[in-house]
Image: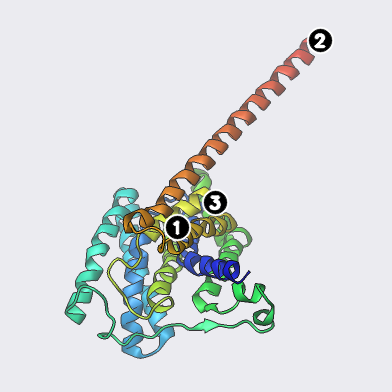
Amino acid sequence: MEFVANFFYSLIRISTPIIFVGICSTLSAQAGLLNMAGESMMLVASLAGVIFSALFQNVWLGILGGVLCAMVITLFICFAAFYMKVDLYLMSISMNMAMGGGVIFVMWLLTDTKANTAGSIPSLALGNLDIPIIKDIPFIGTILSGHNIFTYIAFIMTAVVWFLLYKTKLGLRMRAIGQNPQAAESLGVNSKRIYTIAFLIAAAVGALGGMYLSMGYQNFFSKGLTANRGFIGMAASTTGNNQPLGALIMSLVFGLAYAISNYLQPYISDSYLLMSIPFILCTVVYLVISAYRSGAEMRLIKKNRQKLMDMDRKKEQNE
């Protein structure tokens, strides 16, 4: 039982950054945008959070600085895509590539090393939180209590984003623009403004996922820190039908692959095989869900076609 409890604890811990990026992608998707820039948002925020927390010696100011930096690069993407008419998909990929090298360059300027900021930048980090009463419950307490504060923020953020999308006027406008931008614009909704707001909020959420890795899981930034989790989070959102709860569940599923990879390390010596397991699972799950949805659509079409035929037959009989 102790092994199972520790495994699920590890699953939740590993899934935390994927949850943040999954929710980030869900926000964008509800506004009709494919957010491919989650990786760059995480990278910029993870380094900026370390720098600002060390500069001000305040972890919350560090988090604020990381969020603002992620929003700045997002503003650049929005300006290029929504006002200069650059393809959003290509712009996001370009930003991911640029920031992949850009953060390493900034780290080298500040620390004279391209590996990590450990020992060079005295960054702060959020600690773990023991939940009263729950921590004393056998098995359940081991799984749910003692996580980093970022982890609990991730689950709270899922509820916050759901409330934003389905219980606020801004969320209604996001979904309206995402479903039919022409109809929404005919009612006076500014699509460019809504797109930008949605992308900025998504950047703030995605930034938290990056800072969990550098200010929660550890207290320094290192090369390759995000390890393409931005793309895994986007896949979690897509397979979760671009719904906050669906993205949360699928993030845990993909986090399961990372957890299995960690536990298989003593038995599999090939590190490349271990690294590929989450992406293999991601591909398989996406194919299975896509096949199921395609089959469901075909069944619905056949059902509606049969209803029309039945109606025609009844009409002919009545005549």
Say which of marks 1 and 2 sits in front: 1
Q: Work out whether 257 lies above or below 113.
A: above
Disc 3 from disc 2: Cα separation: 46 Å
Could you say where residue 213 lies in the image, as x and y percent from the top left? Answer: 40, 72
Q: In which quadrant is the C terminus drawn?
A: top right
Tell whether 260 sits left or right of 49. right
Q: Is residue 302 above or below residue 118?
A: above
- How much space separates mark 1 and mark 3, taking CA atoms? 10 Å
Q: Is residue 46 visible?
A: yes
Q: Which residue is mark 1?
A: 233
Along the viewing direction, whichever of 190 and 127 lies nearer the viewer: 127
Which image quarter holds the N terminus? bottom right
Which amino acid, by three-letter code, is at mark 1?
A: Gly
Q: Mark 1 falls on what kind of element? A: helix
Residue pictured at 34% horizontal, 62% vertical: 227
Labelled pair 1, 3 in contact (Cβ < 8 Å): no
In three-dimensional space, the C-alpha distance between marks 1 and 2, rounded to whole angstroms, equals 55 Å
For the residue labelled by badge 3, is the local secondary structure a helix, a strand or a loop? loop
Where, by quadrant of the figure, is residue 4 drawn?
bottom right
Left or right: residue 114 versus residue 44 is left
Q: Is residue 130 above or below residue 73?
A: below
Q: Residue furthest bottom?
A: 57
* Residue picked out by circle 2: 317
Q: Which residue is mark 3?
A: 240
